[in-house]
Image (cartoon, rainbow, N blue to C red):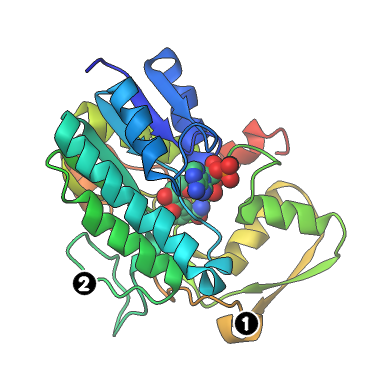
Amino acid sequence: MNSTIAITGAAGQLGGELAKQLGGAAASLTRSQFDLSDDDSIRRVLAELRPSVLINCAAYTAVDMAETDADACFRANAKAVATMAELCHDLNIRFVQISTDYVFDAYAGIPTPLSEETPTSPQGIYAQSKLQGELAAATAPNHLIVRTCGLYGGGPTKRNFVETMIRLSESKPELRVVNDQRCTPSYCRDVATAVLRLIRQDATGLYHVTNSESVTWYDMAQEVFSLTRRSTHVHPITTTEYGAPAPRPAYSVLSLNKYAQATGQEMPTWRDALQRYLADRRFA
Ligand SMILES: NC(=O)c1ccc[n+]([C@@H]2O[C@H](COP(=O)([O-])OP(=O)(O)OC[C@H]3O[C@@H](n4cnc5c(N)ncnc54)[C@H](OP(=O)(O)O)[C@@H]3O)[C@@H](O)[C@H]2O)c1
């Protein structure tokens, strides 16, 4: 055992940001070193590295493709997590699993931010696989599970809502964006900082970590184009009109109360985070 913090999915959005913030303290693991579909590679790497903390940011994240690729999705998001949890138990490693607001579905009545106690109801294959991953991660004695939402970060090469809007606006004067899904898109930089804060404070159990306040994807698109001074016209449409293969929660605004109580910190608002991301990206 040493003081290394191992990060899986280090070439991804959140894993890349965590690796950046941790600098030399991180062992950054990408798919070629640590393959979620290969239990032997998971066992070998963890036995060799013996990190003090394992942060699992690797995941099958192609939400729509998962609907017709369930085996690979469950393999990566549930079975591999169970293997990691077992090894973390055996090797006395603190296990940090990243999960998603998609474990929730629709809301009944007046929408209120969803707490860590709110019953889950995952609808699609990706959502179900991530909830199974949470349950598997919770079998590790020293675990932290962080649910987040709508991640963006890492610049133009990454696949996320903000980058998709910017890319599409380069060829299309008009876009149709759903206006009946409300959540809190979150900047990876802020989420990574919050995850590291929770780790430093030895927090265990389940936490919600997103930027604060909430927005629909339609409003988020309008804000992206306003901040990047683009004239792209955005039309609001419904989830049904958009017709994505995988279901999405209509309301998945996560309550940040538990995080605030544990750390004494408020998360920046989604609007502030988006401004900073676009400024960092040299647009604003
Ligand atoms: N993106 C979101 O909006 C969002 C929202 C809520 C929660 N989350 C959760 O947050 C975490 C991080 O998400 P992210 O947006 O940073 O994801 P991401 O950018 O898609 O990165 C995921 C990483 O996982 C790696 N990966 C995929 N399959 C793998 C396999 N079989 N073996 C090894 N590595 C594999 C990918 O490797 P390659 O680079 O080689 O493909 C990629 O680097 C995930 O647990 C995700 O479920 C994401």
Image point 42% across, 74% down: which residue? 249
User: What is the x, y in percent for residue 269?
Assistant: 44, 48
Q: Are marks 2 and 1 in contact (CB under 8 Å)?
A: no
Q: Which element is circle 2 on? A: loop
Residue 121, position in %: x, y? 30, 75
Q: In this view, does 222 lie above or below 141?
A: below
According to the picture, the residue beneath numbered tag 2 turns out to be: 119
Name the disc covering residue 243, or none: 1
Q: Distance between the residues labelled 2 and 1?
A: 26 Å
User: Which residue appears at 33% of the width and 70% of the height?
Assistant: 104
Residue 9: percent from left, percent from top: 48, 39
Specify whether tag 2 is near ligand 1 (CB below 8 Å): no
Asked if residue 78 lies left or right of residue 158, the reply is left
Q: Quadrant of the C terminus?
A: top right
| Towards the viewer: 125 or 193 | 125
SS at circle 1: loop
Q: Can residue 141 be seen in this view?
A: yes
The three-letter amino acid code for the residue at tag 1 is Gly
Q: In which quarter of the image is the N terminus?
A: top left
Residue 177 in the figure: left or right of residue 18: right
Q: Considering only vertical position in the picture, is 134 above or below 187?
A: below
Mark 2: give few (<14), some (14-19) or many (20+) Cα within 10 Å: few
The answer to whether the residue bearing label 1 lies less than 8 angstroms from the nearest atom of ligand 1 is no
Name the residue located 33 percent from the left edge and 21 percent from the top edge: 49
**Mark 2 belongs to which amino acid?**
Pro
Lower sequence index among marks 2 and 1: 2
Direction from residue 270 to residue 205 in the image, left or right: left
Q: Residue 62's quadrant in the figure?
A: bottom right
Residue at the outermost left position: 141
- The answer to which quarter of the image holds residue 171 is bottom right
